[in-house]
Image (spheres, rainbow, N blue to C red):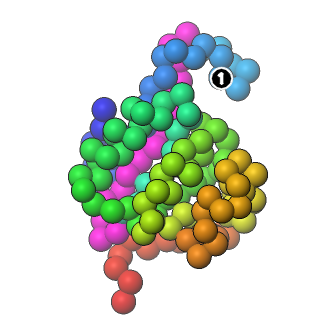
Amino acid sequence: SVKNISSAILGVGVDDTTIDLFESQTGPTGVSYNSYVIRDEKTAILDTVDARATDEWMANVTEALAGEKPAYLVVHHMEPDHGANVARLAAHPEMQVVGNAKTFQYMEQFFGPEAIAKERRVVVKDGESLSLAPTP
C-alpha cells in the first residue's frame, strides 16, 4: 500500500516477507524494497523494486501517480532490489530515466541496449541536481 511520507512524497515500496536471506544477511521478517514517488510540478519516481515484488509495486505506483505521467525515474544503482523493473516502467514514453554513466551501462547489460532509448537518458555527475519545476 502507498504510504504518505509528506504531502509531496509517497512511499510505494514493498515489504517482502517471503525472503529470509538478503545480501548474505538473515532477516526473519524479510526485507523492504524502498521506492518513492515525488509529486511536484513534475513527478519523479525514485528506484524500482526487486522482481519478486513487481505486481504489488506497480499497483502502488499506479495509485500514487493518480493518473499523472511521471517525468523521471531516478535509478540510484542497478542492484536488482533497486532496478529490476526499470525496463517495465520505461513503458511510460514521456518519462526520462536518470542515473550515472555506470548505471546506464548496467541497464544495457540487464535489459539490452534498446530498453532505454539514448534520448530518454539523463546522465548525472556528482554534485548535480534535478529540478522538478516546469521547464521554462
Image x and y of residue 118, in percent: 64, 72
Does residue 91 belong to the magenta stretch?
Answer: no
Q: Residue at x 48, y 16 (%)?
A: 17
Image x and y of residue 68, in percent: 28, 60
Image x and y of residue 6, in percent: 28, 49
Please indicate whether residue 4 sits to the left or right of residue 75 in the image.
Answer: left
In depth, the one of 33 and 68 nearer the eye is 68
Mark 1 closeness class: few <14, some 14–19, many ≥20 residues within 10 Å: few
Please indicate whether residue 60 sits to the left or right of residue 100 in the image.
Answer: left
**Quadrant location of residue 5?**
top left
Please indicate whether residue 19 sits to the left or right of residue 59 in the image.
Answer: right
**Quadrant location of residue 61?**
top left
In depth, the one of 79 and 95 nearer the eye is 95
Image x and y of residue 117, in percent: 61, 68
In depth, the one of 113 and 81 nearer the eye is 113
Q: Amino acid at mark 1?
A: Phe
For numbered disc 1, what is the local secondary structure? strand
**Quadrant location of residue 100?**
bottom right
State the extent of the magenta-drawn residues as a range: 28-42
Quadrant containing the C terminus in the rendered view? bottom left
| Residue extending furthest toward the top | 28
Residue occupied by mark 1: 22
Q: Could you tell me if residue 128 is visible in this image?
A: no
Q: Could you tell me if residue 135 is visible in this image?
A: yes
